[in-house]
Amino acid sequence: MTNNITPLKDIASELLQKDNYLILTHRHPDGDTLGSAFALCRALRKLDKNARVVCSDVIPDSFDFLYDKMDEIIFEPDYIISVDIANPQLLGEKYEHLADRIDICIDHHHSNNVVASLRYVDGDTAANCEIIYDLLKLMEVEFDKDIAACLYTGISTDTGCFKFSNTTPRSHKIAAELMEYGFDLEKINYRMFEEKTVSRVLLESLIMKNMEYHFFGRCCVAKVLRNELEKTGAKEDELDGLTGLPRQIKGVEVGVLIREQVDSGCRISVRTKAPTDASEICANFGGGGHVRAAGCTIDLPIDEAKEELLKVIAKVLGED
Amino acid sequence: MTNNITPLKDIASELLQKDNYLILTHRHPDGDTLGSAFALCRALRKLDKNARVVCSDVIPDSFDFLYDKMDEIIFEPDYIISVDIANPQLLGEKYEHLADRIDICIDHHHSNNVVASLRYVDGDTAANCEIIYDLLKLMEVEFDKDIAACLYTGISTDTGCFKFSNTTPRSHKIAAELMEYGFDLEKINYRMFEEKTVSRVLLESLIMKNMEYHFFGRCCVAKVLRNELEKTGAKEDELDGLTGLPRQIKGVEVGVLIREQVDSGCRISVRTKAPTDASEICANFGGGGHVRAAGCTIDLPIDEAKEELLKVIAKVLGED
């Protein structure tokens, strides 16, 4: 049963009654799952309950402020809560075995299919931390600087620092209220949005160096060759966060990243601006995805793959 | 007299009484000066007054939505208003001659020294558009989608989309209210923060390619050679927006951009993270600036200039 929705106030009173909470976050953790988990954990501990946060993957040290000054505490969990986890696979290898033992699921993904006794899912909320904000208010927890920093981090992360279309007036209103607790907003946003690792810089540089323009600048293609990638020392999945770069160029309607694969063939990421349909382009090669972001693989050497792709893009842009 | 401050409500009633307004924006216009000017211009026109906005420089087309559907109107100005202009030099070549004819100055720079009959300067406000928001409220102008988009653009621009430490709870509260008018928030922020020109990409790529690390990654130096810059086709001042790149690297405390100059010597930009003092480093070479951002010139070939600079940075970081 994954369509039961429990009123948030019932979840609040359940949390006030029970104890010994294990809070699960999703694999490849981000600011929203971690912000949700640590805000809730801090709140429960304030109410003298045992609570701790776990994650299948190592938590990157850029999030260390979220759990600053929180002691490790040992206890046998009685109650399991998942936050910002849309499906059981996202529990990750280490916690997948708990998929059918979740008591409370709190999430903001329309697609949520986590099974739990109590579920609150609101897919129209920009960040899961906005739901946790409501929950803590219902629990009448006294907010402080650390809880505010956790909640702010989630809202900021999931709205791209209030930049994306999922941002609502309410996201801003909650941020305004949280700011009054005086956490270091600039430091948090610096870590979430500005700071780059050395390997990230090498990858960005590699992509930019290889950008080429087609159809009067309406299409930008960046190739990543295997041997060039290896020279950077970066892992291929680090490129996942950079697939949008070619589309960022002014005037570009279709941005393409082509990665040469180890064995043979190429992995293609297509990003478009309205009204161009990225999934339509990728469908020609057996791929798919969303309207503005799609992918496919083409089993050809990189330059031939590019030519095949350009033929399709030419048609879509009416430049054939 | 540049220390007179007029209550904003007096400026509001003055604006309601007079007519035929010329609104001045600063040279190298940004979202805050233009957002302030066009919001005010739209408001005055709504009150059936003549108003138009001018700028010494060409307004980049990424701001076209600010003056969307506004007709050009011809009239002889009786009244001159400056917005977001901290000093007369910022009027630019074309409007410098109006420096002693300004009737109303509205600004948010502590350093403001514009002479005007009526002045409202609040240096603690994140964006000048927050002042214009208050002014329009006092004038009882009915807000609409276009005015809201102009005001939002200024607030978003000057706070780095709510990322910088100048962001206040009030910035968020105003943004929340403005959003209710339903402008395309994502499109505005995309244009202000994501979109890159081809030459910008070439420059970023050039800087990243030339980054080198010193003192266990605590210092990152990027050299820009004259012949490499020329190959990109970009102008040197386009580098001004990219001086922060070396500091963005994780672990870097001092980021340096060294630009080889046409005749001889080098121009140095130093950016630091707390607590390192950038101006202290630059003072060694007769330069100066702020605690986190400073500059100097060193009259040596680029590699020698770099070595001299590294000696000073070593001392400051305690790595000598």
Image (cartoon, coloured by chain):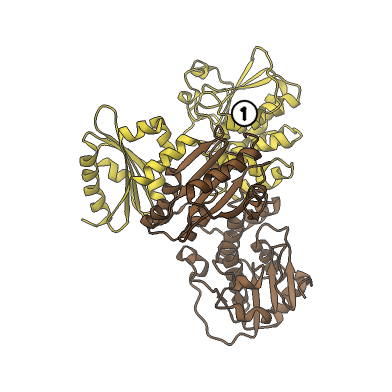
Chain colours: A yellow, B brown
Which three-letter amino acid code belongs to the residue tagged 1?
Ala
Q: Quadrant of residue B208?
A: top left
- Image position of B113 with respect to B186: above or below: below
Residue at image x 74%, y 79%? Answer: B117
Q: Position of residue B292 (x, y in %)?
A: 64, 48
Q: Position of residue B171 (x, y in %)?
A: 66, 54
- Image position of A98 with respect to A269: above or below: above
Q: Position of residue B37 (x, y in %)?
A: 60, 70
Is residue A221 or residue A316 the one in the foreground?
A221
Residue at image x 67%, y 61%? Answer: B130
Please say whether residue B309 is visible from this viewpoint: yes
Q: Secondary structure at mark 1?
A: helix
Q: Quadrant of residue A142?
A: top right
Please say whether residue A124 is visible from this viewpoint: no
- Quadrant for the N terminus of chain B, please: bottom right
Q: Position of residue A126 (x, y in %)?
A: 55, 42
Q: Is residue B291 left or right of residue B188?
A: right
- Image position of A261 with respect to B211: above or below: above
Is residue A184 or residue B131 the one in the foreground?
A184
Residue at image x 74%, y 41%? Answer: A181
- Quadrant for the C terminus of chain B, please: top right
Residue occupied by mark 1: A37
Q: How many marks?
A: 1
Q: Farthest bottom residue?
A: B76
Q: Is residue A1 left or right of residue B32?
A: left
Q: Farthest top residue?
A: A76
Residue at image x 44%, y 61%? Answer: B235
Is residue B248 or residue A82 the one in the foreground?
B248
- Image position of B266 with respect to A151: above or below: below
Q: Chain of mark 1?
A: A
Tell me the crowding category of disc 1: few under 14, some 14 to 19, or many 20 or more residues within 10 angstroms, Cα based. many
